[in-house]
Amino acid sequence: MANSSSSTHFLLLPFPGTRQLQLLHFWLSLAIYLAALLGNGLIITTIAWDHHLHTPMYFFLLNLALLDLGSISTTVPKSMDNSLRDTRAISYAGCVAQVFLFAFFMSAEYFLLTTMSYDRYVAICRPLYYETLLGSRVCVHMAAAAWGCGFLYAVLHTANTFSLPFCQGNAVEQFFCEVPQILKLSCSTSYLRELWLIVASACLVFACFVFMVVSYVQIFRAVLRIPSQQGCHKAFATCLPHLAVVSLFITTGIFSYLKPSSLSSPSLDVVVSVLYTVVPPAVNPLIYSLRNQELKDALRKMPTGCLQKQ
């Protein structure tokens, strides 16, 4: 078959069924996308507006909301556009951009989640040193490190992936340009470089996961020693949402990239990809806002405060 490296486009996985089902997919995707935009936008606006929320925990949460907006905007709008126009095509440059941006936002988010676990550890286990260990400058540096590491990770993955020759056609068995699916189009043993990079990435992910587990073991040990029931509830309220987000993000992402080929099927791949690309950005604002009383109070006060300023 012709080398698709010289092609001007790739073909994404089509949404099966009638035209009515394609339009249903478009409207459902639009609803989820708008919910993610609204939820994350409210978190960003509320944290920026309320000076009581200008603390390290909410600073990192604001960065998480920005990354969620970026990641869902990388994949869902193109899928919606293809369903609406009844097409499968994505340009070669568009596919490269999707791989880069998706790897950038998702890896930066994971590094940021690791940083957030450290923030909760210091706040609960070493509260007397909180201001010293997590001053404003330190928080900015840690957030910048997460974004910077995500950028370098994305550059490596994108460069390795698209330096390969593709001779297995140009049909990507996914609703967006996903690295494991693109590697299936390669006919060169050079793809082993990218596989080794994925394995190395998995090791780094595992190391961060161990760090988070150790942090939360220490956190829960400290929380269970808190005599005040109110203080115990507040500590759990700030930690459990983060733990839920991390668990969903890690389990679905690792399964998608490292699952054995015997378990691979187009329908399963799409379901797993939706779980780690679409669901977290849409539900993260709900998880954090429902479990965080300070954020809920700030959301209620914001409309009144804006009217008073006017």
Image (cartoon, rainbow, N blue to C red):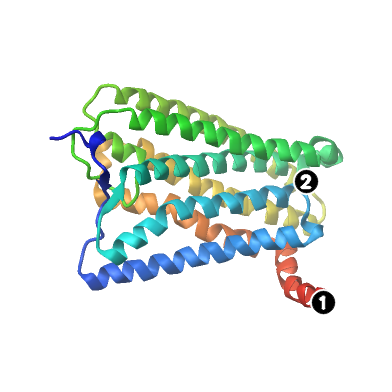
The residue depicted at 38 percent of the width and 40 percent of the height is 96
The residue depicted at 28 percent of the width and 64 percent of the height is 85
Query: At label 1, which amino acid type do we have?
Result: Gln
Left or right placement of residue 310 versus residue 274 in this view: right
Numbered tag placed on residue 287 in the rendering: none
Left or right placement of residue 70 versus residue 268 in this view: right
State which quarter of the image contains the N terminus: top left
Q: Position of residue 187 (x, y in %)?
A: 21, 28
* Quadrant position of residue 195: top left
The local secondary structure at tag 2 comes to loop
The residue depicted at 32 percent of the width and 52 percent of the height is 175
The residue depicted at 47 percent of the width and 55 percent of the height is 73
Number of the front mark, 1 or 2: 1
- Residue 213 visible in the shown view: no
The local secondary structure at tag 1 comes to helix
Q: Find disc 1 in the rendering and name its residue.
A: 308
* Pick the front one: 223 or 275: 275
Give above or below for 43 relative to 250.
below
* Quadrant position of residue 53: bottom right
Give above or below for 6 relative to 106.
above
The answer to whether mark 1 and mark 2 are in CB contact below 8 A is no
Q: Find disc 2 in the rendering and name its residue.
A: 225
Q: How many residues crowd around disc 1 within 10 Å: few (fewer than 14), some, or many (20 or more)?
A: few
Left or right placement of residue 56 versus residue 146 in this view: right
